[in-house]
Amino acid sequence: MVGRGENDNNLFRVRVGDRAKHVVTDLTGRRGSMGWNGIAVDHEFAYFTWQDDLGDIWVMDVVTDSSE
């Protein structure tokens, strides 16, 4: 499950029987945020998207030299 509020940007494992939750990640305070594309898990890994687009500066050379 994806945490929200004070647990924002962390993944949790929840036991069905007693609803006990365990934090799987510690991403609070990191730049960016958890994406909204969902999560996927297998027997070994958790897969999720991370959005980190704050403050990025993209540079592109728009001047081309005709001799090249």
Image (cartoon, rainbow, N blue to C red):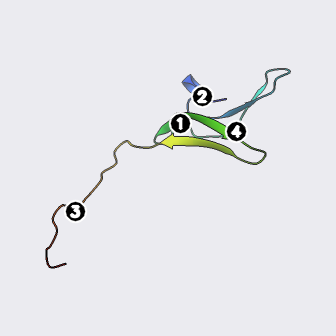
Name the residue that disc number 1 marks.
Answer: 34
Q: Is residue 20 above or below residue 23?
A: above
Question: Of the residues shown, which amino acid type is indicated by label 4?
Answer: Val
**Side of 34 relative to 53 (left or right):** right
**Side of 50 relative to 26 (left or right):** left
Name the residue that disc number 3 marks.
Answer: 61
Name the residue that disc number 2 marks.
Answer: 7
Which mark is first along the chain, 4 or 2?
A: 2
Real-space CA distance between mark 1 and mark 4, rounded to the nearest whole angstrom: 14 Å
Instruction: Return the x and y of residue 44 as percentages of the image width and height.
Output: 76, 48
Which mark is first along the chain, 1 or 3?
A: 1
Residue lying at 54% horizontally and 34% vertically, measured from the top left:
37
The mark lying in front, picked from 2 and 1, is: 1
The mark lying in front, picked from 3 and 1, is: 3
The mark lying in front, picked from 2 and 3, is: 3
Q: Quadrant of the N terminus?
A: top right
Instruction: Return the x and y of residue 61 as percentages of the image width and height.
Output: 22, 62
Which mark is first along the chain, 3 or 4?
A: 4
Circle 1 crowding by C-alpha within 10 Å: few under 14, some 14–19, many from 20 = some
Question: Of the residues shown, which amino acid type is indicated by label 2?
Answer: Asn
Tell whether label 4 touches label 1 (CB within 8 Å): no
Q: Quadrant of the C terminus?
A: bottom left
Circle 2 crowding by C-alpha within 10 Å: few under 14, some 14–19, many from 20 = some
Instruction: Return the x and y of residue 63 as percentages of the image width and height.
Output: 15, 64
Name the residue that disc number 4 marks.
Answer: 24
Question: Of the residues shown, which amino acid type is indicated by label 3?
Answer: Asp
SS class of the residue under badge 2?
A: helix
Which mark is first along the chain, 3 or 2?
A: 2
The mark lying in front, picked from 4 and 3, is: 3
Q: Quadrant of residue 20?
A: top right
Q: Is residue 19 above or below residue 37?
A: above
